[in-house]
Image (cartoon, coloured by chain):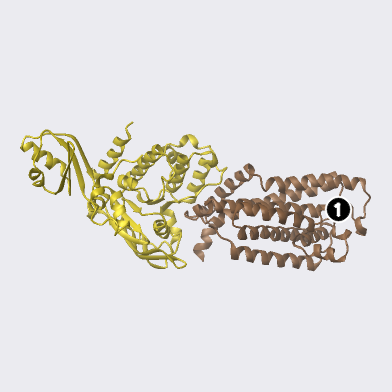
Chain colours: A yellow, B brown
């Protein structure tokens, strides 16, 4: 199966489910969150609001404060100041009630080596008042066959899926997944992504911590970028990427075209030529308008390639404010990473 | 208060505890750190001392007791020590790998897992006691004339004291590797003080007193007296209570779930 196709399917799936902001209600509200470890500020004045049913990404470099933020949301840590509201409850004061409907997958958390997958799931199911059937959870994650396998004998991908299964078996309204695909091979990553999509399909709000930009781009409805303990940006991945330099269209015209025809198209900012290729950068969805404009003067295009500015670019720009300001040259750097 | 009582004794709470007991029991069978030494060592030593007892005449160190009489309480305490020393092993491992932290994101606090493990360890200690009493009396003819109330009191105090010491190790050591190292040293020190190699009645004054008032020696002494229907010396019982309080305090004060 072509992996690129699968990714694109999920992407367009999200586009179709573009939501009306008015249907949504916030399930998690964080206001001016501050958390220090000793003198080091782990999180400084982070505010964000997560809507019911969305996949909300928290991205940022290592040590930026992503994990601390979700640990405060799940009640594992107590903020130094600020306010967190999870479905009308405080994670710190109502931890017992919140743990009923918030499923957490922790970064680097293992099971006792000889505990079998099925036993762990049964155990966790017994903890909640309205759990899902452990067998069905394992089945839906495609790991029913490892039910009797001890944790120590699982592969990395299987361990991650068991970890997700444990976060889901309590039938949570909110699932917090921290560095879910770190250390997985490309195949396992794609499968895990599909899984998260299915979780959202069941109405679970997903908070996804990651430092993989492609993961955030593929899955997330909105992304918060945290760097050096502060919230740098919060928007859809597309909007963030657009900030980093918009889109780029590259093609080979059937005969030479004059720049003025291209500049006349809405959103076009720059035209470059290299060998037979014409590369147009600008904002918005220019590809269709470009083709129309060229067709109007009798020019066909071939080898058409359209790319949006990537979250990678946005990430680099926003986390190195000074270094890359004004540079849009890296727009085309996005690749589907393996 | 009412809510928390319901939390502890409610129906769901019992379901959760039952599930934890089941899982911990299965793990204890698969990784028999407690089961093997806790039952195995005293069972093997029972035979060793039983046969020594058969071929040596009684009245060890002028105590009026035979080898098997004297060593049965020691073997009981050795069983408790072996179980207690295994506790930090798995508990520290579960903390180290993030399992306890993982549990703390669920409605069940990891202290419940510790509770389940302690219940199982207590049952294991009870099994060892029964094996030693039955084996000692039936096979080797130890003339135990147990004074039930003090015997049970002594055993309960001894188990509480030695398990608390295991929890102190679990609270203070950072990793499973350190837990094994510390546990190993502590194991042999406690074994010596319990009289495995030489009984207090066989040694001179300073060492005998050290043994009598050490954590494992005090436990042996209290059990020994009550096993022969005597009132245990108050000093032994007080020592057990004192040690239990200190160990429990340190364990609670320094224990970390993550």
The kind of secondary structure element at disc 1 is helix
Which residue is at the far left?
A297
Q: Which quadrant holds residue B36?
A: top right
Question: What x and y, as percent, mark residue B4?
Answer: 51, 62
Q: Is residue B64 visible?
A: no
Q: Residue at x 80, y 62 (%)?
A: B211
Q: Disc 1 designates what residue?
A: B69
| Left or right position of B189 against B3 | right
Quadrant of the image for the N terminus of chain A? Answer: top left
Q: Position of residue B239 (x, y in %)?
A: 75, 66
- For this rendering, which residue is in front, A239 or A325? A325
Subunit that carries the residue with mark 1: B
**Visible residue check, residue B256:** yes
Residue at position x 56%, y 54% from top?
B95
Residue at 51 percent of width and 40 percent of height: A118
Q: Position of residue A65 (x, y in %)?
A: 40, 59
Residue at the extreme top:
A1
Q: Along the horizontal axis of the image, is B188 left or right of A149? A: right
Of B143 and A257, which appears nearest the observer? A257
Residue A56 percent across, percent down from the top left? 33, 52
């Amino acid at each position: 199966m072509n992996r690129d196709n699968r990714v694109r399917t999920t992407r367009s799936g999200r586009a179709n489910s573009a939501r009306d902001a008015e249907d949504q209600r916030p399930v998690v509200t964080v206001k001016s969150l501050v958390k220090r470890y000793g003198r080091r500020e782990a999180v400084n004045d982070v505010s964000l609001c997560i809507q019911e049913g969305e996949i909300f990404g928290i991205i940022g470099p290592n040590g930026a404060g992503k994990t601390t933020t979700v640990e405060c949301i799940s009640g594992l840590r107590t903020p130094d100041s600020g306010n967190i509201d999870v479905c009308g409850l405080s994670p710190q004061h109502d931890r017992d009630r919140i743990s009923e409907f918030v499923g957490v997958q922790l970064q680097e958390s293992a099971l006792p080596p000889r505990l079998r997958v099925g036993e762990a799931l049964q155990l966790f199911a017994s903890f909640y008042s309205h759990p899902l059937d452990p067998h069905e959870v394992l089945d839906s994650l495609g790991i029913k066959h490892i039910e009797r396998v001890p944790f120590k004998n699982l592969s990395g991908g299987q361990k991650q899926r068991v970890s997700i299964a444990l976060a889901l078996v309590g039938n949570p309204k909110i699932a917090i997944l921290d560095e879910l695909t770190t250390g997985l091979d490309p195949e396992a990553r794609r499968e895990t992504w599909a899984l998260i999509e299915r979780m959202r399909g069941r109405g679970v709000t997903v908070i996804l911590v990651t430092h993989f930009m492609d993961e955030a781009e593929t899955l997330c409805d909105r992304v918060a970028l945290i760097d050096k303990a502060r919230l740098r940006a919060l928007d859809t991945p597309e909007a963030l990427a657009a900030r980093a330099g918009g889109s780029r269209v590259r093609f080979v015209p059937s005969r030479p075209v004059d720049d003025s025809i291209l500049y006349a198209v809405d959103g076009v900012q720059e035209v470059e030529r290299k060998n037979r290729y014409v590369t147009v950068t600008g904002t918005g969805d220019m590809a269709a308008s470009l083709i129309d404009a060229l067709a109007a003067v009798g020019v066909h295009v071939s080898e058409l390639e359209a790319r949006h500015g990537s979250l990678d670019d946005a990430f680099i720009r926003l986390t190195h404010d000074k270094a890359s300001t004004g540079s849009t040259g890296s727009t085309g750097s996005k690749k589907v990473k393996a | 208060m009412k809510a928390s009582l319901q939390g502890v004794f409610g129906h769901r709470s019992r379901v959760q505890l039952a599930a934890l007991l089941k899982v911990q029991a299965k793990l204890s069978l698969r990784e028999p750190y407690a089961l093997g030494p806790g039952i195995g060592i005293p069972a093997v030593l029972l035979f060793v001392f039983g046969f020594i007892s058969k071929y040596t005449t009684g009245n060890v160190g002028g105590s009026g007791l035979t080898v098997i009489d004297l060593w049965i309480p020691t073997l009981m305490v050795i069983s408790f020590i072996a179980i207690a020393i295994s506790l930090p092993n798995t508990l520290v491992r579960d903390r180290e790998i993030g399992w306890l932290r993982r549990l703390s994101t669920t409605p069940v606090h990891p202290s419940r897992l510790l509770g389940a493990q302690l219940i199982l360890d207590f049952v294991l200690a009870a099994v060892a006691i029964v094996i030693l009493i039955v084996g000692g009396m039936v096979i080797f003819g130890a003339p135990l004339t147990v004074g039930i109330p003090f015997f049970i009191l002594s055993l309960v105090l001894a188990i509480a004291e030695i398990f608390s010491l295991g929890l102190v190790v679990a609270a203070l050591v950072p990793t499973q590797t350190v837990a094994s190292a510390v546990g190993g040293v502590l194991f042999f020190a406690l074994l010596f003080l319990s009289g495995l190699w030489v009984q207090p009645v066989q040694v001179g004054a300073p060492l005998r007193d050290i043994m009598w008032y050490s954590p494992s020696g005090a436990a042996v002494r209290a059990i020994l007296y009550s096993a022969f229907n005597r009132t245990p010396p108050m000093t032994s019982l007080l020592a057990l209570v004192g040690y239990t309080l200190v160990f429990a305090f340190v364990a609670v004060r320094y224990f970390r779930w993550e």
